Amino acid sequence: MWQCANLGVYKSEVNVDTGATERLRVPDHLLNWAITQDIPKESGQGGSERAVVVRKLHSAKACVVDAVGAMIEKANNGGEAHGSLRPPPTVIEQMLKGMLLGSRPKYIRANTTTTYHDNGPHLCVPTSVVNRPRSTFEFFEWYYACGKYANCGRSLTMANKALINWCKAIDTLSDVGMLQWKEDCDEYLEANNADFQRRFNDQQFVDLFLAGIIKLDRLNQAWHMQGEPGPRPRLHGVFE
């Protein structure tokens, strides 16, 4: 299923350090860009080469949307008493396009409007949580038990697991290094708080983490609208 979201081919290359032959997956940037596009299903009718490719793209997208929907549904399962919620396919398709937290222009004839989207970690919060967060910002209020959740008891283990599960879902969709980004933000704060200097408080993790998500959302917008797409934007290596 990960291969359906990250289309490409396997190639054998010799590792210059060890001399061993390694099998590496090389992504196909054009196909990975094409799978995020809204291609009409009618384009897949017939027996032409283009029609065959379109059908395969739709099949790969359907596989990804179904599998990631199941991941999120499992993550937010609140037990027998509360059940679970699976996001609509349209939400997963937005996430596949890289629409995480931000806005996009919408063109209707001669008019341009702005539509906002928030497909953040609140999707993975268990349904058993009282006053369950409905947005990314509410999620982090719940995560740190502040704001409207200041007087609400919550499990830090549960909150951290919800964030990790969301990162895994995003990486399954597009391999952008979201889980590594979370770990890099944690390590950055720890390194700058060494020797009890306390340059940052724990909640400033949100500033770093959300800055990366919002920046990635904007980069994905530009990438998605390119006529000649290159590699998909990633968060890997930001602190290197």
Image (tube, rainbow, N blue to C red):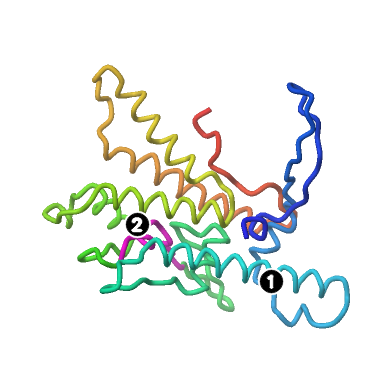
Front-most of 162 and 224? 162
Quadrant placement of the N terminus: bottom right
Look at the picture and state if 50 lies above or below 226.
below
Residue 122 is a magenta residue:
yes
* Mark 2 burial class by Cα count in 10 Å: few <14, some 14-19, many 20+: some
Relative image position of residue 95 (x, y in whole percent): 52, 61
Name the residue that disc number 2 marks: 136
* Mark 1 burial class by Cα count in 10 Å: few <14, some 14-19, many 20+: few
For image coordinates 88% across by 76% down, the residue present is 48
**Position of 98 compared to 199: left or right?**
right
Residue 41 occupies quadrant: bottom right
Name the element at disc 2. helix
In whole angstroms, how far apart are the C-alphas of marks 1 and 2? Answer: 31 Å
Look at the picture and state if 111 lies above or below 183.
below
Relative image position of residue 117 (x, y in whole percent): 44, 64
Front-most of 92 and 225? 92
- In the image, the segment drawn in magenta is 115-126
**Position of 73 compared to 240: left or right?**
left
For image coordinates 79% across by 32% down, the residue present is 21
Name the residue that disc number 1 marks: 59
The label number, if any, that marks residue 189 in the structure image? none
Q: Residue furthest top?
A: 195
Name the element at disc 1. helix
Relative image position of residue 176 (x, y in whole percent): 56, 47
Of the residues shown, which amino acid type is indicated by label 1?
Answer: Ser
Q: Residue furthest right?
A: 48
Front-most of 228 and 100? 100
